[in-house]
């Protein structure tokens, strides 16, 4: 009887161990200048690595989830960390170096009466999509070093969905992006990136700075009244100094001129 019980226990443990082993799998995908290694538990993506090798350069970027936050690190710049998480179903991202928050970006619903304080707002629109508003705080001047170029480029140019998102959705989107043949080029080649961006027209709609009360201090804002038609407003010292009707195409040179003249004042 003991022999039979022992036999059944052994069989159950063997099947259980085999099941756990079968739940784990690794998937490799070759891409331009490297490869992506994804690790799954059952059907869920647990983490993945992007290995980049070109000429004498080699680096590995590690992507993982810790609770509800996506963590991105890399081999060569181990003091730099990118964090991506979700707030009110909208994307939030942070760039840290040596534990200091150097850049913070949050997707917001734009309401002039409920804007975040002490930061900048960048508005943009791609083709027929709705206007997207990024609130950000730039503390790069606080960096005690500059060993984070590759990490910050990844932080700046990695594009994902922004509204109605979850951590899992963003994590899988990033993994899918790096499975594309030209993913590394889209991040690190300015010529290639400019080419792909020109194929999907990006319209600038706002560049604003808010004070400690969340009020617009200085900036320019274009608001849509009908498809591609609207008006723009210029703010200075918390007051509206100009308002004019203009279509979105005609607003682009107005925005560019304003940005060049006033960027240094947006503090």
Image: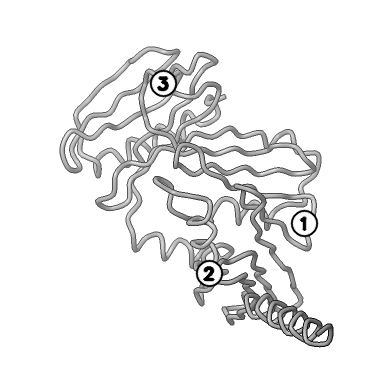
Q: Secondary structure at mark 3?
A: loop
Nearer to us: label 3 or label 2: 3
Q: Which quadrant of the figure contains the N terminus? A: bottom right
Q: Within the image, what quadrant is residue 29 found in?
A: bottom right
Relative placement, left or right, of 254 versus 76 is left
Q: Are marks 3 and 1 in contact (CB under 8 Å)?
A: no
Q: Are marks 3 and 2 in contact (CB under 8 Å)?
A: no
Reading the image, the residue beneath label 3 is: 114
Reading the image, the residue beneath label 1 is: 77
Reading the image, the residue beneath label 2 is: 183
Q: Position of residue 66 (x, y in %)?
A: 67, 51
Against 233, residue 160 (above or below) is: below
Marks 3 and 1 sit apart, C-alpha to C-alpha, by 37 Å
Nearer to us: label 3 or label 1: 3
| Foreground residue among 77 and 194 | 77
- Residue most toward the left? 226
Residue appearing at x 68%, y 38% in the figure? 102
Marks 2 and 1 sit apart, C-alpha to C-alpha, by 20 Å
Residue appearing at x 62%, y 52% in the figure? 70
Relative placement, left or right, of 179 versus 69 is left
Is any part of residue 34 visible from this angle?
no
Q: Within the image, what quadrant is residue 45 found in?
A: bottom right
| Mark before the other along the chain sequence, 3 or 1 | 1
């Amino acid at each position: 009887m003991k022999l039979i019980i022992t036999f059944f226990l052994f069989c159950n443990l063997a099947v259980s161990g085999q099941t756990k082993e079968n739940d784990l799998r690794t998937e490799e995908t070759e891409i331009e200048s490297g490869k992506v290694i994804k690790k799954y538990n059952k059907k869920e993506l647990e983490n993945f690595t992007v290995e980049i090798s070109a000429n004498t350069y080699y680096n590995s970027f590690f992507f993982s989830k810790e609770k509800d936050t996506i963590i991105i690190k890399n081999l060569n710049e181990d003091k730099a960390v990118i964090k991506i998480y979700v707030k009110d179903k909208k994307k939030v991202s942070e760039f840290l170096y040596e534990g200091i928050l150097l850049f913070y970006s949050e997707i917001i619903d734009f309401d002039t009466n409920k804007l975040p304080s002490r930061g900048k707002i960048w508005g943009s629109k791609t083709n027929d999509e709705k206007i997207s508003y990024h609130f950000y705080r730039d503390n790069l001047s606080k960096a005690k070093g500059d060993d984070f170029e590759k990490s910050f480029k990844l932080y700046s140019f990695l594009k994902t969905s922004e509204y109605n998102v979850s951590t899992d959705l963003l994590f899988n989107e990033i993994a899918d992006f790096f499975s594309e043949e030209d993913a590394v080029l889209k991040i690190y080649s300015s010529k290639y990136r400019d080419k792909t961006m020109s194929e999907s027209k990006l319209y600038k709609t706002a560049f604003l700075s808010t004070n400690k009360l969340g009020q617009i201090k200085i900036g320019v804002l274009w608001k849509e009244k009908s498809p591609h038609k609207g008006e723009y407003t210029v703010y200075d010292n918390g007051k509206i100094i100009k308002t004019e009707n203009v279509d979105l195409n005609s607003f682009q040179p107005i925005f560019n001129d304003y940005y060049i003249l006033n960027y240094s004042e947006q503090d």
